[in-house]
Amino acid sequence: MAINGESRNASIWRGATVLAIAAVVTKILSAFYRIPYQNIVGDIGFYIYQQVYPIYAMVIALATYGYPVVISKLVAEQAEEKNEAGIRYVLQVSFWFLAVMGLLCFGVLYVGGGGIARWMGDEKLTPLIRTISFSFLLLPFLSVLRGYFQGKNEMMPTALSQVAEQSVRVATIIICSYLLVKTGHTMYEAGTGAIFGSLTGGFAALLLLSAYWLRSARSLYFYEASRLSAQSVIRYLFVQGLTICIANMALTLTQLADAMSLLSLLMEKGIEEQAAKAFKGVYDRGQPLVQLGTVVATSFSLTLVPLIAGAKKRGDETFILEKIDVTLRVALVVGIGAAFGLAALIRPVNIMLFKNDAGSWPLAILSLSIFFTTMSLTASALLQGIGYEQFAVIGVLIAFISKWLGNLWFVPMFGIAGASWATWLSYIVMFLFLYQVLRKKIGVWFIRKKDVYAVMKAALIMVVSLKLYMWGTQLWGGSRLGATGQALLGVLLGGSVYIIMILRGKLFSPKEIALFPFGEKLRIFLGKIGDEK
């Protein structure tokens, strides 16, 4: 029996790892494609797309991170009891609940698209909003199929569907935008073509999931009555689904705050409409950079969250404390390294990725927010892992309100740099709130002063090294090719200096280092440093 339990736990852990890898891959794809897209359509075209992107991100949150997770829990409970009728009933009720929700969201966006576009300050966005509204019609199909497979601990269909969805979507965005721009269409038409990728990606995921479903000859028809009540299933879906969705929407909602307020605030500042759109497009260059930096910074630390959730069920408090401690330290180290490193190299990185150095100062400010974003998302995930999802939701709402108010305060004074400062404010407030909750619930101070000192010392030495390097290679930065070489070598130099200083600072024990990618090699390197000292 113990062997079966261990085997099942190992299977669950493997499944969680598969989903974690798929999540990292899709997030990298979701961030990376915006660079060639901006190169094709320019800053105004990029502004157009980024204005409606948060709406699509909500669809992804609902159909990937929200309802599939909730449905999977209900399916898993019925599977434990070997109640096939219960599983079928859960799937049917979930499907019709989400079908109604999807139709309502579709109707609101399609009919109200003009009003939403006017609220954003640009009525020409109406066709894009209406196009993206169709994505909500796929919500019940994707959520129910993913939830079923996850509930049965078959993670591969969900993982592959996520990667397929993003891959097809990215290909559609790049191809459509290129062809539309080439053939003389307007930037708004190119943006509508790019948004069409949300539909092609969704259909690709649906086809793949359907193939897995049909291969097993399954049907949603059920033959016997279930003891479950539709009301209890719907209540669980509504409460838990929205909780998980909102808890994972921090980046999306802060971008939504920018979409709803930044353009109008820039125009109120006296900036002409076309120039304001271009400024917003330049500011939006920072979104893929922040997203990539945050994905890198959280990818390792968040893989520990399923282990923490498992330990919570077992009541293993020692394991929970150890893993929360190491998770926050990893987030601290990687978050500060990514934030300060990118800020120091922002000019050549800006030229390398976006052809020119426009907006490098506001982008440097925004880059530094990677640290607070990383710490906030990590603390949020930890609270979800130990069963306090409601506080993660409150943290996200605090970030959204802080971002909106920050824009109102700072943008009139500092322009798009003010929007960057507002992002800082939102994630600082979110992290302080979540960290205090985490500390009170666990009863331990996790972030120690000596660790902060060691990390800041490493970051300072890295930044000084990079500034000297930038001064010595300033002649390279005149062209895009030169800036590319300067940026890539700078990443290699800065990363090497930072890692060496972190290892010298002994923030992690040899046992903890072994958990990292290339951990064994790092342990050997650490041993050599110790011998030299």
Image (tube, rainbow, N blue to C red):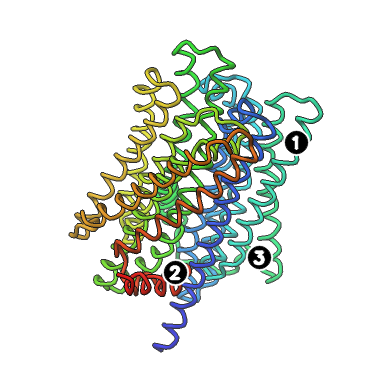
Q: Residue furthest front?
A: 472
- C-alpha span from label 1 to label 3: 42 Å
Q: Secondary structure at mark 2?
A: helix
Asked whether disc 1 touches disc 3, contact meaning CB atoms under 8 Å apart, the reply is no
Q: Which-is-in-front pick, marks 1 and 3?
A: 1
Q: Residue at x 59, y 22 (%)?
A: 114
Q: Secondary structure at mark 3?
A: loop
Residue in front for this viewpoint, 252 or 504:
504
Which residue is denoted by mark 2 in the rendering?
77
The quadrant of the image that shows the N terminus is bottom left
Residue in front for this viewpoint, 43 or 481:
481
Specify which label sits upstream in the sequence, 3 or 2.
Answer: 2
Which residue is denoted by mark 3 in the rendering?
219
Mark 1 neighbour class, 10 Å CA radius: few under 14, some 14 to 19, many 20 or more: some
Q: Is residue 217 above or below residue 43?
A: below
Does residue 299 appear anywhere in the picture? yes
Q: Amino acid at mark 1?
A: Tyr
Q: Residue at x 25, y 54 (%)?
A: 438
In the image, which disc is placed on residue 178?
1
Q: Amino acid at mark 3?
A: Ser
On the picture, is 303 further left or further right than 449? right
- C-alpha span from label 2 to label 1: 48 Å
On the picture, is 288 further left or further right than 479? left
Which of the 4 image quadrants contains residue 400? top left
Q: Residue at x 46, y 75 (%)?
A: 80
Does residue 129 appear anywhere in the picture? no
Q: Which-is-in-front pick, marks 3 and 2?
A: 2
